[in-house]
Image: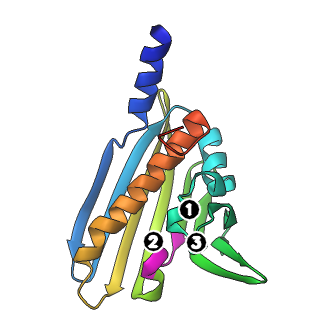
């Protein structure tokens, strides 16, 4: 019984402590999502960066195959997707790295990449009692035909789900809630 209670508490810890579009206007928005993961910053960083292909949602790739995703965690590194035969896409470019603490990437993630927008996505890893607080902040600005406000909610949900998948992967070995 104690084991089930402990597992239930771990599952609750992986739920977003905060998920929100903190501001939104015609020309941009900011999405902030965070979770507490029951693991050290080192374990969490390694999973987030070196094992992105294991937790990234294949539905949010061009190829439909998350195993093609990679992150090069150094300045001017690439959050990329290989499309085979020397083809691929840069989803975001790494602009700042402080191992086990911060990764900042610039660009338009997913469909934002083909619009007149740009963004800064910051992943922060903070040691706290019981694990690591991970915060994904994505500030996006630029031109979109119908304004940026209608994009903020869907982007926030995708980023929030990515963070939940990371938390589940670190804590259970599977990003899926069903496994």
Mark 2 secondary-structure assignment: strand
First of labels 2, 1 by sequence position: 1
In the displayed structure, 136 sits above or below 30; it is above
| Residue 122 in sight | yes
Residue at image point 39% right, 85% down = 117
Sequence-first tag of 3 and 1:
1
Mark 3 or 1: the one toward you: 1
Left or right of 158? Residue 131 is: right
Q: Assign a secondary structure to mark 3.
A: strand
Residue where numbered disc 2 is placed: 120
The residue that mark 1 highlights is 58
Q: CA distance from mark 2 to mark 1?
A: 22 Å
Q: Is residue 40 visible?
A: no
- Residue 95: mark in rendering: 3
Distance between mark 2 and mark 3 Cα atoms? 9 Å
| Residue 118 placement (x, y as % from top left) | 43, 81
Do the residues under discs 3 and 1 have CB atoms within 8 angstroms? no
How did the renderer colour the structure?
rainbow
Q: Separation of disc 3 and disc 1 at Cα?
A: 25 Å
Residue drawn at x 47%, y 55% is 162
Classify the position of the C terminus by image quarter. Answer: top right
Which stretch is magenta? 105-112
Q: Are marks 2 and 3 in contact (CB under 8 Å)?
A: yes
Residue nearest the viewer, comparing 138 with 55: 55
Q: Quadrant of residue 92?
A: bottom right
Cβ atoms under marks 2 and 1 closer than 8 Å:
no
- Quadrant the N terminus occupies: top left
Residue 11 % position (x, y): 43, 31
Q: Residue at x 60, y 70 (%)?
A: 94
Q: Name the spot of residue 81 as percent of width and height, x first.
A: 65, 72
* Percent position of residue 129, x then y: 47, 27
């Amino acid at each position: 019984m104690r084991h089930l209670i402990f597992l239930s508490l771990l599952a609750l810890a992986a739920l977003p402590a905060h998920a929100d579009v903190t501001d939104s206007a015609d020309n941009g928005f900011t999405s902030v999502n965070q979770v507490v993961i029951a693991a050290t910053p080192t374990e969490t960083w390694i999973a987030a960066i070196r094992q992105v292909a294991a937790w990234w949602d294949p539905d949010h790739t061009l190829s439909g195959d998350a195993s093609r995703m990679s992150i090069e965690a150094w300045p001017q590194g690439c959050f990329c997707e290989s499309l085979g035969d020397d083809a691929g896409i840069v989803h975001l470019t790494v602009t700042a790295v402080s191992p086990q603490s911060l990764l900042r990437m610039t660009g338009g993630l997913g469909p934002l990449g083909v619009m007149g927008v740009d963004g800064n996505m910051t992943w922060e890893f903070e040691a706290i009692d019981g694990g690591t607080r991970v915060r994904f902040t994505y500030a996006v600005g630029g031109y979109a035909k119908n304004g940026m406000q209608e994009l903020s909610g869907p982007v926030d949900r995708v980023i929030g789900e990515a963070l939940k998948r990371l938390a589940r992967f670190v804590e259970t070995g599977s990003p899926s809630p069903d496994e």
